[in-house]
């Protein structure tokens, strides 16, 4: 370990922006790659197609990395605030979260309603989006299943908001020993839920969208923060690559062997112990990804990846709008239609849909960051006790 080496009152690690973008990219792959019964994939890959489907399903654990990283940073920043000032200013914490999340979150819900109106399904989606508006999106998806509206991606934001209800209070009043106990309680609760959901043969969406299940990753992030105690792991490059590779292997095993996300593969609930083991692997893989990224030499980080990490909230919020929009209007199929061979046309269609939706997502996120989010981020910075991620376009010395 080594000391973080940042001035008092400041905590910014650009390598975590790169990790944010990497986590988003995994989620994007999860939503664009075929996860089962794709004739083109089976024609090209043959008997290896199920492996590719499992990889595509495993990419969904990019969301677990987001949860773990969020908990790590919240814990790190609030503990630094407590050490610097003797307390945690709860009101300022909530103001910062509101200014960062709510403007884009509620804009996306309005866009989701607009999509529902355009497609003639506003009566179907209005009630569900209403639950999202009070940050209960995860629970309505767990109970009724996910909606096909592109605003469905916001369910994970509702899980984070539920975590924020308790995080500042716990970090303000609990000692480090009590924080370890708090994490143990979260882990116990998550695994009890998984055990009984397995016994009940619950559907995949009742498990995946369950906030208590996802809190296991938040516990992992807090534990990593407590273990590091403000220091940075000292790994050489090959060790970091190994940790990140192990992280991906954990995600893959969780899907391919423990059969997490079993509905995506057309399987049945694998049972309690497979669920417990699979979600533990997902949490461990997420912690390894964060630990392996912390402390990377900033000179090794490409500027474009740092920038995309800074706008990753917008990338995540808008990506399903871009993907569903291009698929609905069949832009890729239209552009690939002159190709005579069925397989070549299908490959080109998939490639164009992937590339165009990624480009459109980046464009939407960049414009949103510049013209919608930045004014609120300036207000958020005025509420900061510990300065963290700078606004893109503004310089911040990296030590």
Image (cartoon, rainbow, N blue to C red):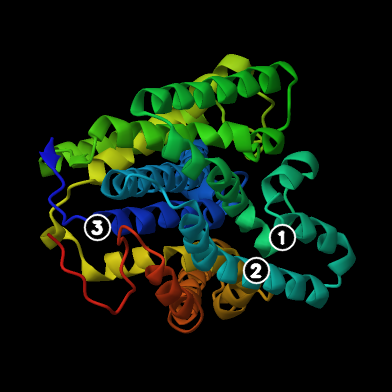
Q: Is residue 248 above or below residue 320?
A: above
First in sequence, mark 3 or 1: give its number.
3
Q: Secondary structure at mark 3?
A: loop
Quarter that holds the N terminus: top left
Dot 2: few (<14), some (14–19), or many (≥20) neighbours within 10 Å? some
First in sequence, mark 2 or 1: give its number.
2
Residue 119, image quadrant: bottom right
Instruction: Give whichever of 90, 381 is nearer the camera.
Output: 90
Q: Secondary structure at mark 1?
A: helix
Residue 76, image quadrant: top left
Please give left or right for residue 128 compared with residue 285 in the image. Answer: right
Please name the residue that numbered disc 3 is placed on: 9
Please name the residue that numbered disc 2 is placed on: 106
**Callout 2–callout 1 Cβ contact below 8 Å:** yes
Residue 11: image tag:
none
Please give left or right for residue 291 compared with residue 62 in the image. Answer: left
Residue 133: image tag:
1
Residue 292, x across and y down, in percent: 24, 40
Residue 236, x across and y down, in percent: 10, 41
């Amino acid at each position: 370990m080594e000391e973080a080496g940042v001035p008092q009152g400041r905590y910014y690690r650009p390598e975590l922006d790169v990790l944010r973008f990497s986590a988003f990219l995994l989620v994007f792959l999860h939503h664009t790659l075929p996860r089962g019964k794709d004739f083109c994939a089976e024609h090209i890959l043959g008997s290896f197609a199920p492996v590719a489907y499992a990889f595509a399903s495993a990419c969904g654990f990019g969301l677990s990395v987001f949860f773990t990283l969020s908990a790590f940073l919240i814990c790190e920043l609030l503990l630094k605030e407590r050490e610097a000032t003797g307390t945690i200013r709860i009101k300022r914490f909530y103001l910062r979260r509101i200014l960062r999340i709510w403007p884009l979150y509620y804009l996306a819900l309005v866009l989701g309603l607009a999509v529902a109106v355009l497609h003639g399904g506003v009566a179907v989606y209005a009630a569900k989006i209403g639950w999202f508006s009070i940050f209960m999106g995860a629970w309505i998806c767990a109970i009724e299943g996910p909606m096909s509206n592109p605003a469905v991606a916001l369910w994970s934001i509702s899980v984070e908001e539920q975590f924020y209800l308790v995080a500042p209070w716990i970090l303000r009043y609990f000692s480090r020993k009590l924080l370890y106990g708090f994490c143990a309680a979260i882990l116990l609760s998550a695994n009890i839920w998984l055990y009984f959901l397995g016994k009940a043969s619950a559907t995949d969406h009742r498990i995946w969208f369950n906030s208590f299940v996802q809190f296991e990753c938040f516990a992992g992030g807090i534990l990593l923060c407590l273990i590091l105690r403000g220091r940075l792991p000292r790994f050489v490059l090959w060790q970091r690559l190994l940790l990140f590779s192990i992280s991906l292997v954990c995600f893959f095993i969780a899907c391919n062997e423990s059969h997490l996300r079993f509905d995506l593969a057309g399987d049945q609930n694998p049972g309690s112990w497979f669920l417990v083991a699979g979600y533990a692997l997902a949490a461990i893989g997420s912690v390894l990804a964060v630990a392996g990224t912390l402390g990377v030499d900033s000179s090794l980080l490409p500027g474009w990846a740092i920038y995309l990490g800074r706008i990753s909230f917008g990338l995540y919020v808008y990506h399903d709008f871009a993907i569903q929009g291009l698929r609905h209007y069949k832009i890729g199929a239209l552009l690939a239609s002159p190709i005579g061979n069925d397989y070549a046309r299908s490959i080109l269609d998939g490639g164009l849909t992937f590339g165009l939706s990624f480009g459109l997502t980046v464009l939407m996120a960049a414009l949103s960051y510049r013209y919608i989010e930045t004014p609120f981020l300036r207000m958020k910075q005025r509420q900061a006790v510990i300065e963290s991620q700078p606004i893109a376009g503004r310089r911040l010395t990296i030590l």
